Image (spheres, rainbow, N blue to C red):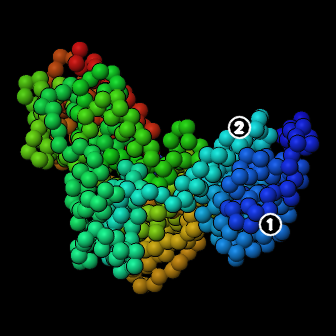
Amino acid sequence: MGPRDGLRQHVAGRRQVAASPQRERPRLRDVAPVLFVIDHDQASLEVLVSGLSRRFGNDFSVRGESSQEIAVTALQELAAAGRPIALLLVDDAAMGTLACAQKLHPSAKRVLLVDRDYTSTSPAVQAIALGRADYHLVRPWADEESMYGVMTEYLSSWTREHEPRFEEFRIVASEGDSRVLRLRDVMTRFSLSFGVYGAETEVGRRFLRQADLDPTELPAVIRYDGRVSIDPSLPDLARAIGVKITNDLDTCDVAIVGAGPAGLTAALYAASEGLDTVMLERDVSGGQAGTSPLIRNYPGFPHGINGAVLMERTCEQAWLMGAHIVFTQQAVALERHGDARVVRMSDGTSVSASAVVIATGIDWRRLGVPPLEKLVGSGVFYGASVGESRAMQDQDVFIVGAGNSAGQAALYVAKYARTVTLVIRGDDLANSMSNYLIRAIESTPNVFVRHHTEVIDGRGDGRLESITLADRSSGTVEEVPATALFIMIGGEPRTQWLPADIARDPEGYLITGRDLRERPEINWGRDREPLPLETSIPGVFAAGDVRHTSIKRVASAVGEGATVIRLVHEHLR
Ligand SMILES: Cc1cc2nc3c(=O)[nH]c(=O)nc-3n(C[C@H](O)[C@H](O)[C@H](O)COP(=O)(O)OP(=O)(O)OC[C@H]3O[C@@H](n4cnc5c(N)ncnc54)[C@H](O)[C@@H]3O)c2cc1C
């Protein structure tokens, strides 16, 4: 029995109870947001429309079409009438409508309905990786709950984005004020509800008047209780949000520096295992992971998860376990006082710990093109995400970077993609890439190199569609279609604040564990072996991106954050 047969049985069992699409309540169907189903299989369509009507009919109008042409016309009419589509459920045979639907109804959640086929050629693989669909559903489904339960989740995500929200903060600023980006970033990382209003607009002027503010005092941050900060510094803002920015513990079992995935996980495990834990973060919670709109490779989230949400939940969990979390407090020095390790902070205070975990990550170089930053995770990727390569089948892919990792990624992705273009600023790869890679690139017919070129802009509605390239030698600018852009322009580990004698590799990453013993120039000076993840200073550990040979992935940082606490226990014993 094939998957369709299974579905037909399911359909047959339900047909007599299914409401027909025509039986929707007349008032609702004219005003409510629409759930639109396109399914070539008439029987399956009926089941879906009746099931959705039963479940969601009080809040949404449900409509179904089996013909792609009729569906597209209906979607055009709905767009012209200004009716929002909340969810578009499309079977794989009608996948072509997704691109057009995206243009007509950019805020609709797009769900692809596919037959069960766990091979890399399933249409769901490419559609999700390239941001053509937000979610997928597999048929046949075992029971109603497994089908409509996840649908509830997708719809609540649409509702959250569209319903009016109580705003904890209102930011009033002049148009184009770049300080707003910073304010937005901090509020997003704490999952705060906020609105941004132009100081020149009527509503912006009204908020300034209500708060008794001079219209030149900008950007103004107005809290729900009327408290106002003008152009707040990061600590001012953190204070207004209600997080701790000073440390009140002189001593602790473990001090953790850096609140990215590695540090937050270490704090969670340390506190949950009864260690007095202080966590210091120079900025606010989340690290690099917190800046990623969509992390696609974190286990357990097949449709990806917003990095700020994942990190905020981890931070909340560490706090509930009892970790003392201090934001906007940079660690500026590490000292040895006998067995104690002392971390000095930017406000002049210090904390003495029996063990220290350094989880300060890397300063990734960013492309700095705002429209492309918005598409990170939806066609734009930092670093080589080899796992995405299969999804690049027959696509046009661009890689920015001239180092060995960019070269290796180009060759790997070229096995699947139609074309891979390396975009490099210089006029020769030989300055930065190994010769063997250059030769391999030259002999791979679908890999191209664009010299003295920079990516200066990009476009896409929810997924990358094109990038703009500027050729600095000819002065020409060209917009080219692009399905994916991998940015591999390197970064620098944040280890400058550490003592000069802590062992680092030539790039500044911290050397740990067995790697210390393989380097005769490093004087370990203890009669025991260094523990895995222990640096050349006993009792000081490193976890995550900052560590030499680390994997530079969220899940690996989380893994090291959990592992390092087991090693801290061993050290304390
Ligand atoms: C845009 C982008 C998208 C990405 N997408 C993905 C993805 O989809 N999947 C994936 O697996 N990986 C992704 N990565 C990589 C991933 O984010 C990192 O591998 C991961 O965040 C590393 O975690 P970490 O805790 O080691 O360091 P970080 O996340 O860098 O956190 C380090 C923290 O330490 C703080 N800090 C630094 N110095 C100090 C100091 N002196 N005192 C106090 N605090 C300090 C920093 O402010 C920061 O908060 C992405 C990276 C970027 C830049």
Q: Nearer the viewer, residue 452 or 331?
A: 331
Residue at figure coordinates x 34%, y 76% from the top left = 205
Quarter occupied by residue 378? bottom right
Task: Say which element carries label 1.
Answer: helix
Q: How many marks?
A: 2
Kind of residue indicated by mark 1: Ala
Kind of residue indicated by mark 2: Ser
Residue at figure coordinates x 64%, y 70% from the top left = 103
Mark 2 close to ligand 1, CB under 8 Å: no
Q: Nearer the viewer, residue 435 or 489?
A: 489
Q: Report x, y in % for residue 90.
A: 75, 56
Task: Say which element carries label 2.
Answer: helix
In the image, residue 118 above or below residue 523? below
Between discs 1 and 2, the one toward the N terminus: 1
Q: Nearer the viewer, residue 57 or 180?
A: 57
Residue highlighted by disc 1: 71
The N terminus - image quarter: top right
Residue highlighted by disc 2: 146
Quarter occupied by residue 546? top left
In the image, residue 272 above or below residue 348? above
The C terminus - image quarter: top left
* Mark drawn on residue 406: none
Report crowding for label 1: few under 14, some 14 to 19, many 20 or more residues within 10 A (C-alpha).
Answer: many
Q: Report x, y in % for residue 366.
A: 36, 61
Residue at figure coordinates x 87%, y 53% from the top left = 20
